[in-house]
Amino acid sequence: MSNGMDDRRRGLEEEYFHRKNKEAIEKLRAKLKASEEAKAAGASSMKCPRCDGTLHESKFEEVLIDTCDKCGGIWLDSGELEQLTVKERETPGWFDRFWFAEG
Ligand SMILES: [Zn+2]
C-alpha cells in the first residue's frame, strides 16, 4: 500500500510551518537584538527598547513575555523564544493570532 498522498501533504504542511516559524523567529530576533542593544546601552530592562514606554511582564500561553504599555511591542529572551516556537509546533495557529494581535 502506498501512502504517497499523505506523505506529500504532510511534506507541504511541514514546509509551510517551517516557513512561518522562520518568519516569526526572524521577527523575534530583530526584537531580541533591539532589546540586547538597549541593555548594552545601559537602559533599564523594564524600559521599552523601541519607545519610552514601560515593559510589563505577563504570562501568555504559559510563557512569560514583556509587553510595552505604549507601543504594544512584545519582548522575549532566548529561552522564551524557544518555548514559543515549541508551542507553535504543538498548537499550530495560535502564534499567528499572537502576532496579528500585536497590530
Ligand atoms: Zn514601546
Image (tube, rainbow, N blue to C red):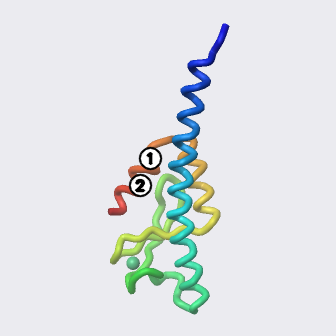
Relative side of 42 to 60, left or right: right
Residue 2, placed above or below residue 65: above
Q: Dot 1: what SS? A: helix
Within 8 Å of ligand 1, the CB of disc 1? no
Instruction: Tell me residue 82's x, y (percent).
Output: 62, 57
Residue visible at 54% across and 26% down in the picture: 9
Q: Dot 2: what SS? A: helix
Q: Looking at the picture, which amino acid does disc 2 mark?
A: Phe
Residue visible at 65% across and 11% down in the picture: 2
Choose top left, top right, bottom left or bottom right for residue 78.
bottom right
Instruction: Tell me residue 83's x, y (percent).
Output: 60, 55
- Give the number of the disc on residue 19: none
Residue visible at 46% across and 83% down in the picture: 47
Within 8 Å of ligand 1, the CB of disc 2? no
Relative side of 23 to 73, left or right: right
Residue visible at 57% across and 45% down in the picture: 18
Report the front residue among 57 and 38: 38
Give the crowd class for mark 1: few <14, some 14-19, many >=20 residues within 10 Å. some
Outermost top residue: 1
Q: Looking at the picture, which amino acid does disc 1 mark?
A: Trp
Report the front residue among 13 and 64: 13
The quadrant of the picture showing ligand 1 is bottom left
Residue 27, placed above or below residue 84: below
Relative side of 70 to 81, left or right: left
- Give the number of the disc on residue 98: 2
Residue that mark 1 sits on: 94
Residue 40, placed above or below residue 9: below
